[in-house]
Image: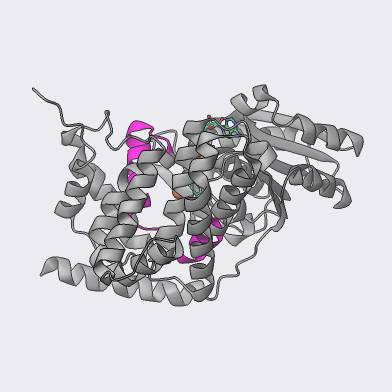
Amino acid sequence: MLFTIKVYFYKSLMSILKVLIKFIPQPAPLLYIGENSALALAKQIPMLGKRKVLIVTDKILNELGVANDICQVLDQHGVEYVIFDGVRPDPVDTIVHQGAQILLQQSCDSILGLGGGSSLDAAKMIAALGSHPGKTVKQLAGILKFKRKGVPLFLVPTTAGTGSEVTAAAVITSNENYEKMLVVDPKMMAISAAIDPVIMQGMPAKVTAETGIDALTHAIEAYISGHSTPTTDGNAIAAIKLIFSNLEKCYLDGNNLNAREAVALGSTYAGLAFSHANVGYVHAIAHQLGSAYQVPHGLANALVLPHVLDYSEPACRTHFARLAAEIGLSTLGKTEHQISLDFIASVRTLIQQLNIPTTLDKLETKDIELLACKALKEAHYLYPVPRYLDKRTCQKIISNLIVKRVC
Ligand SMILES: NC(=O)c1ccc[n+]([C@@H]2O[C@H](COP(=O)([O-])OP(=O)(O)OC[C@H]3O[C@@H](n4cnc5c(N)ncnc54)[C@H](O)[C@@H]3O)[C@@H](O)[C@H]2O)c1
Ligand SMILES: [Fe+2]
């Protein structure tokens, strides 16, 4: 009874949000797409009158020389640059503050984020702090807290997963309690982004697999969201098709540029879909696993995704059956229920083909109740999920990830 009342409250809250979202502007960056498009983007920077760029990236990518060709183009066009490579996976606020200090000390007039979602999110927040002097990430965290647009921002993703290059959101971890802070504001949108498969060529197979499943999760959660629209559905379906037909190819051969470009585009489409329709329980639970055990974001999603789909199936049968048809599964002579289950089975098969584990060593039974409470708190005030979960069922979903030890 109490759960029914709570669900009624959450649904009402999501209906109000659905109306409010319509009044929030949805800017999108100019997209450069294809091989060496990152270099075309670099040429745009001086054309916009920018003279000194802060390149925000991480140490691994800097040491791999991923920025070299971009720096060469900037040199050729007389643009100065400073490289800040202090970003770590799931960036903490103190690193963002360091980056913002360098931006001001070096008098940079623009920022180029180069990396996975961690570097792009850090770059977005450094740009925001650059135009809000004296503020901290914590003070800007939440929804629509920005007073003005950030420092002009250009983004080049090196993973195909988060879609951060087209979203008005950043996820920054608190250095105090390791909780993830969500920052959402259209004023953080980049001027342009490059979807360049060449820059993703060196991505390790494990990162390719896990980030690809992050993108798939964005698309599926957006498609079954209560805030979906015909436009977000179109983007989500395009993403799901591209990822299903190309992710395993990229995983097996990182130099397959056609497959890399297809998955990268899929990730961008998924970003466009979830930036309006939002995500759901998979992300709510995955964020807690990331905070508690530093599990990479894509892996955390891959662990949780099939179990949340199982639970959501009765409310999403028609949606899953449509997705099954879109990815080319046979539907002839089958009931909608069977086709829907086939779709979930093909998600499990893809995860298995990518050799992603299905259990989490670090997860302990004693932690599950708190993880479930935090996940539900995040989901119920933010995400328009298709079928609501109570605490006990959420705990059950998380307990599927416990390693079964034989005594
Ligand atoms: N802003 C958004 O809309 C949004 C959406 C989803 C996730 N996120 C956030 O994004 C972060 C995760 O980003 P991610 O999954 O892209 O991973 P990441 O940026 O944390 O990178 C993971 C690892 O892969 C390496 N790497 C990245 N690209 C590489 C390449 N081309 N070659 C070799 N190594 C490479 C990085 O150096 C790093 O060690 C999380 O903090 C998550 O919360 C943000
Ligand atoms: Fe994600």
Residue at x 33% of width, y 39% of height: 289
Percent x, y of residue 49: 87, 50
Which quarter of the picture shows residue 387?
A: bottom left
124 sits left or right of 224 in the view: right
* Colouring convention used in this rendered image of the protein: one colour
Residue 277 is covered by the magenta coloring: yes
Which of these two is toward me, 237 or 292?
Answer: 237
Residue 4 is covered by the magenta coloring: no
Which quarter of the picture shows residue 224?
A: bottom left
User: How many numbered tags mark residues here?
Assistant: 0
155 sits left or right of 183 in the view: right
Percent x, y of residue 155: 67, 46
Percent x, y of residue 54: 73, 37
Is residue 353 depicted above or below 344 in this figure? above
Chief SS of the magenta region = helix
Is residue 155 depicted above or below 385 in this figure? above
Is residue 240 depicted above or below 180 in this figure? below
Q: In which quarter of the image is the N terminus?
A: bottom left
Q: Is residue 376 visible from the viewing direction of this image?
A: no
Residue at x 23% of width, y 69% of height: 7
Which of these two is toward me, 225 or 347?
Answer: 347
**Residues rendered magenta in the picture:** 270-296
Which of these two is toward me, 142 or 376?
Answer: 376
Residue at x 40% of width, y 59% of height: 221
Percent x, y of residue 346: 35, 52
Q: Is residue 193 visible from the viewing direction of this image?
A: yes
125 sits left or right of 180 in the view: right
Residue at x 46% of width, y 58% of height: 219
